[in-house]
């Protein structure tokens, strides 16, 4: 770790030397014999603390020179702490200095123990202030600006949330892993009329299938071996508020029917109980899978699908709004550094550019993990190195698909026209598979832009590709 730096501003060469000898083992010492030299040192170096003698030229006997410079420092660089040097008989001057922003003071002639204790104490106080400021800034960012980004995609997402939040409609959130589906659900809740009521988030894919009904609707004592006492389900806990079912595709068919009845009537019974319980909840569901494919395969009830698929919100993957990465990366670094009790400099532009060249298959969650590793492993207060990015790199999907297709060609050869047709069909099929069979998303993935919907319809007709559920109008 780099030593923290101290700028000693004193016109007495012996004083500066003594302070340097006292502090050099713990700190990097910079020196200035007058105010011009102090300004130059502050401009050219990162300084963690200034030790300022109030008796400075051109009027060494006039402490107002030093006090005036202290006030200027507080205006121009309020984040830089200052410890002042006074005479032992100048208590009133020291108190004026602290009133003008000095963190602490010590007197001349120097008492080595007093000097070291004062400097160490001031450094620690300043570090604690920075930690508190960063934690507050991080907290403000989490509360007020959770959906960061000024790209058109993120602006459209925020607009959609504001339009939908205050309605009672069930919302279906689509998005890849790590895009922030729960974050969007929480934003919908926070901007709704139910904001003061509970928000309950459940990951259906992480729950044992045989326990999902009990978790959703609760159970009475003794209904199964693990049911030692009555348990309230998520529907009861979320009464008056919002219930968020993440990865709703993971619900077993046996639970889907009871969920549908509860949504339609607002009534249910605990497992093993006869009492009818009413619960008023706003349901939000999400999935990373193509739920339409599960419906077509009989793995998800179509009536439940239509009941939860009232308003759809699609979260763009990070690669589709990569221009937001610098802002996201800065916010994440602040959060991760604050949680580690560290103060970090902004990410260098070279690091930002490296991050923007990556495809981010794990989206913002992967970005969080990468930056956290970089912060933890950083030497000093600046990230100079990003751990290796192991996921697929951008713009290689089509090349990989081409190589796999070429490897499957017969040795006897194939006509150019048929080869082009076959590869085009394979490319369209792959685009649809990777985008939940949604034509417009598949078209954008292929780079068709505003022509995505019409172009994909044409290609699907051309190659006689059937899509079980036509969701091509979704954006």
Image: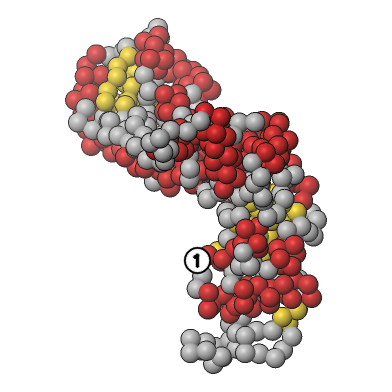
Left or right: 248 as drawn, with respect to 354: right
Residue 72: image location, x then y, percent:
50, 19
Identity of the residue drawn at 61% across and 67% down: 299
Tell which of 140 and 114 is nearer to you.
140
Crowding at dot 1, Cα within 10 Å, few <14 / some 14-19 / many 20+, comes out as few
Q: Which residue is mark 1?
A: 206
In the rendered image, the vertical position of residue 113 relative to residue 212, given as above or below: above
The quadrant holding residue 272 is bottom right
| The one of 247 and 383 positioned closer to us in this rendering | 247
Above or below residue 123? Residue 74 is: above
> Which quadrant would the N terminus be assigned to in this image?
top left
Q: Is residue 343 in view from this perspective?
A: no
Q: How many marks?
A: 1
- Residue farthest to the front, as pictured: 412
> Horizontal and vertical percent for residue 412?
40, 35
User: Front-most of 9 and 372?
Assistant: 372
Say which residue appears at 68% left-offset and 68% top-offset.
301
Q: Secondary structure at mark 1?
A: helix
Where residue 57 sits: x, y (%)? 38, 9
Instruction: Work out which quarter of the rendered image holds the C terminus and state it.
Output: top right
Outermost residue on the top side: it is 58
Residue at (23, 23) in percent of width and height: 20
Whether residue 417 is situated above or below residue 461 in the rendered picture: above
Q: Is residue 468 left or right of residue 166?
A: left
């Amino acid at each position: 770790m780099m030593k923290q730096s101290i700028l000693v501003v004193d016109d007495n060469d012996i004083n500066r030397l003594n302070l340097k000898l006292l502090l050099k083992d713990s700190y990097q010492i910079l020196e200035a014999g007058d105010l011009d030299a102090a300004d130059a040192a502050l401009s050219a170096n990162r300084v963690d603390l200034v030790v300022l003698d109030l008796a400075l030229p051109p009027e060494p006997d006039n402490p107002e020179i030093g006090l005036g410079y202290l006030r200027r420092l507080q205006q121009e660089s309020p984040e830089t702490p200052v410890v002042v040097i006074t005479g032992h008989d100048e208590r009133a001057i020291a108190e004026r200095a602290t009133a003008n922003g000095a963190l602490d003071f010590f007197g001349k002639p120097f008492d080595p123990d007093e000097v070291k204790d004062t400097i160490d104490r001031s450094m620690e106080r300043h570090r604690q202030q920075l930690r508190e400021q960063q934690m507050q800034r991080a907290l403000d960012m989490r509360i007020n600006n959770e959906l960061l980004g000024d790209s058109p995609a993120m602006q459209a997402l925020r607009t959609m949330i504001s339009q939908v939040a205050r309605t009672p409609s069930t919302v279906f959130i689509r998005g890849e892993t790590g895009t922030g589906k729960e974050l969007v659900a929480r934003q919908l809740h926070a901007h709704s009329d139910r904001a003061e009521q509970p928000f309950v988030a459940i990951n259906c894919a992480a729950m044992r299938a045989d326990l999902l009904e009990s978790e959703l609707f609760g159970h009475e004592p003794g209904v199964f071996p693990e049911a030692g006492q009555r348990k309230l389900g998520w529907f009861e806990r979320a009464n008056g508020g919002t219930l968020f079912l993440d990865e709703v595709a993971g619900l077993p068919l046996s639970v889907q029917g009871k969920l549908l009845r509860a949504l339609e009537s607002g009534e249910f019974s605990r497992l093993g109980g006869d009492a009818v319980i009413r619960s008023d909840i706003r349901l939000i569901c999400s999935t990373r899978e193509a739920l339409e494919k599960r419906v077509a395969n009989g793995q998800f009830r179509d009536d439940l699908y239509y009941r939860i698929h009232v308003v759809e919100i699609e979260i763009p993957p990070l690669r589709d709004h990569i221009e937001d990465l610098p802002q996201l990366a800065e916010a994440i670094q602040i959060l991760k550094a604050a949680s580690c009790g560290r103060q970090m400099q902004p990410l260098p532009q070279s690091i930002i550019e490296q991050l923007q060249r990556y495809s981010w298959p794990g989206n913002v969650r992967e970005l969080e993990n990468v930056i956290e590793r970089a912060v933890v492993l950083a030497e000093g207060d600046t990230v100079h190195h990003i751990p290796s990015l192991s996921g697929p790199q951008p713009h290689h999907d089509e090349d990989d698909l081409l190589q796999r297709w070429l490897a499957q060609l017969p040795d006897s050869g194939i006509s150019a026209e048929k080869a082009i047709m076959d590869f085009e069909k394979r490319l369209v099929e792959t685009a649809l598979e990777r985008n939940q069979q949604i034509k417009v998303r598949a078209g954008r993935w292929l780079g068709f832009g505003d022509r995505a919907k019409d172009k994909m319809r044409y290609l699907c007709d051309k190659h006689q590709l059937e899509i079980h559920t036509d969701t091509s109008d979704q954006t």
